[in-house]
Image (tube, rainbow, N blue to C red):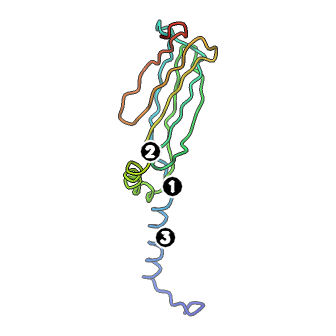
Amino acid sequence: MAAWGYVSSPRRAVLVGASFVVLFGVLYPFEMEILPAFSFQVVESSGAPLGGATVKYYWAHYSIDAEGGREELVSAADGTVNLSAKSVRACLLARLLVPFHDAYARATLHGSTGILGQIVVYDPTSRYDSATFAVEPGKPIPSQLVLKPLSLQP
């Protein structure tokens, strides 16, 4: 007989252990990639590479982690920008509740749902206008982003 009048059995120990494993599996925040690694080139309207452009990358999985993240880079001399894959951490329970959260948010709120990345590129010398594009799962990512000189803007 165990202390405090508690009778232990192998079946109860297995049940408690299995319950702990299931609870851990449902509540442990596993990492999930939401946006892939990719690269693109910043160019002038003439097609010439534009090095030194500031690139700001914002991303979030609004259904799981509304804060998301941000990264700031500078394009290389040949205009290329290489962005790493982005991920969030979420438990299985949160992932199972995402469809319900999204349906509620669409029906009652005016907020964003799902995965979204946003790229903003601007020239720190102020000779070129800024440019932007969205990064979404399953949608093509442009290979080039064109910055137009401010004097050519309509």
Q: Position of residue 151 (x, y in %)?
A: 54, 7
Classify residue 52 by image quadrant.
top right
Measured Cα–Cα span from mark 1 to mark 2: 27 Å
Give the residue displayed 43% in from the left and 41% down from the top: 115
Q: Position of residue 108 (x, y in %)?
A: 41, 51
Measured Cα–Cα span from mark 3 to mark 1: 15 Å
What is the secondary structure assignment of the residue under circle 3? helix
Q: Is residue 60 above or below residue 2?
A: above
Instruction: Work out whether mark 3 precedes mark 2 in sequence or the reverse, and give the earlier one.
Output: 3
Q: Is residue 85 above or below residue 91?
A: above
Frontmost of labels 1 and 2 is 2
**Amino acid tagged 2:** His
Please give the label number shown on residue 110. 2
Please give the label number shown on residue 29. 1
Q: Position of residue 136 (x, y in %)?
A: 41, 35
Q: How crowded is mark 2: few (under 14 residues within 10 Å), some or many (20 or more)?
A: few
Q: Nearer the viewer, residue 69 or 16?
A: 69
What is the secondary structure assignment of the residue under circle 1? loop
Q: From the image, tell me which residue sits under label 3.
A: 20
Classify residue 134 by image quadrant.
top left
Q: Residues within 10 Å of mark 3 (few under 14, many from 20)?
A: few
